Image (tube, rainbow, N blue to C red):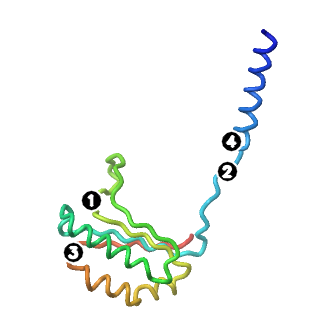
Amino acid sequence: MKNRRSFIQKMAAGVSAAVLAPVAVQASPAVGLSGALIHHVFFWLKEPGNQQVRKQFEAALKKLLKVKTIKISHIGIPASTESRDVVDHSYSYSLMVVFDTREDQDSYQVDPIHQAFVAENSHLWNKVVVYDSVDV
């Protein structure tokens, strides 16, 4: 009985080591955005508590993502992370879009879909802040 128990314990330890070893040594691959232009837009709605306005704005943001030069996108609201001096939870929505090149971002700015988004929805916000970034 003792030999059997010892054998099972050693097998369990061996299986655990074999399963976990590859996980422990694998590094998490980085997302490749080399050369990309990241366009991050923050919106403060005039009526952030108005669910009808929020629904309209979310639909408009989703429609905006149809611009062909957008490669990656994310529509978000403030996360419920801890309150710290460096964290701004005051915005209503964020839009992050990634372009392959500066030219693609320039094209986005004059795209009829983007132009319509601004014309049809600018009355919904009272503040917009944009951060554009490229590789260092």
Q: Nearer the viewer, residue 4 or 84?
A: 4
Q: In which quarter of the image is residue 31?
A: bottom right
Q: Which of marks 3 and 4 is nearer the N terminus?
A: 4
Which label sits on residue 123? Answer: none
How many tags in the picture?
4
Q: What element carries label 3?
A: helix
Q: Are marks 3 and 4 in contact (CB under 8 Å)?
A: no
Q: Earlier in the sequence, mark 1 or mark 4?
A: 4
Disc 2 from disc 1: Cα separation: 35 Å
Disc 3 from disc 2: Cα separation: 44 Å
Q: What element carries label 1?
A: loop
Q: 94 left or right of 32?
A: left
Which label sits on residue 124? Answer: 3
Label 4 sits on residue: 24
Q: 80 left or right of 105?
A: left
Q: Are marks 3 and 1 in contact (CB under 8 Å)?
A: no
Which label sits on residue 90? Answer: 1
Above or below for 123 versus 79:
below
